[in-house]
Image (cartoon, helix red, strand yellow):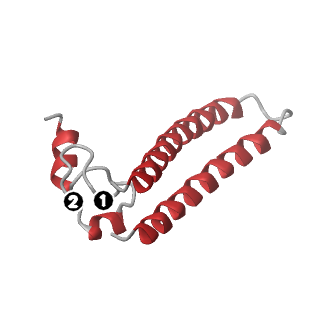
Amino acid sequence: MEADRARALVAAERARIEAALAELTHVADDELSHADQHPADSGSDLFEQELDEGLASALRDELAAVERAEERIAAGTFGLSVESGTPIPDARLEAVPLAERTVEEQARLERGG
């Protein structure tokens, strides 16, 4: 994959993730303004807060993957598996721009093998 295309895909992922994080922060700030709510709502609020924290954590992990992809682009190794150095097909990178491994390697990693 050409470096310019890789940069564009990774930049789009960065923008998507940063927008999602900003939206979570905005929603959390809005919820703080409801100090006069009914006590029964606090359970729902706690659930929502924990869900948002989980989503924010996942988004921060994705942001770290963006930074690793940007480093690989700068180093000229974007599109090569971080595990084996095998080229990752362009079709996979188009679908999953932050892919660090081939499909087979990722499946093996997820199975724990």
Depicted 51 relative to depicted 66: above or below: above
**Which comes sooner in the sequence, label 1 or label 2?**
1
At x 74%, y 48%, the residue is 26
Q: Which residue lies at the image location 56% right of the left edge and 40% below the top edge? A: 56
Image position of 80 with respect to 39: above or below: below
Circle 1: residue type: Gly
Q: Few, some or many C-alpha atoms within 10 Å of disc 2 (few <14, some 14-19, many ≥20)?
A: some
Q: Quadrant of the C terminus?
A: top left
Seen from the viewer's position, the closer of residues 42 and 16 is 16
Residue 8 lies left or right of residue 102; in this view the side is right
Q: x%, y% of residue 63?
A: 51, 46
User: In this view of the protein, which residue sits in the foreground, 88 or 56?
Assistant: 88
Q: Which mark is residue 79?
A: 1
Mark 1–mark 2 Cα distance, whole angstroms, equals 6 Å
Q: Secondary structure at mark 1?
A: loop
User: 48 or 81: nearer the eye?
Assistant: 81
Residue 98 x/y as whole percent: 39, 54
Percent x, y of residue 84: 18, 46
Identify the image quadrant of residue 35: top right
Position of 92 with respect to 14 (left or right) is left
Residue 38 versus residue 88: which sits nearer the camera? 88
Q: Does dot 2 land on a helix, a strand or a loop?
A: loop
- Residue tagged 2: 87
At label 2, the amino acid type is Pro
Residue at x 49% of width, y 47% of height: 67
* CB contact under 8 Å: marks 1 and 2: yes
Quadrant where the N terminus sits is: bottom left
In-image side of 30 versus 21 (left or right): right
Give residue 9's position: percent from left, percent from top: 46, 66
Residue 43's place in the image compared with 67, above or below, is above
Q: Residues within 10 Å of mark 1 (few under 14, many from 20)?
A: many
User: Residue at point 21% right, 59% down?
Assistant: 87
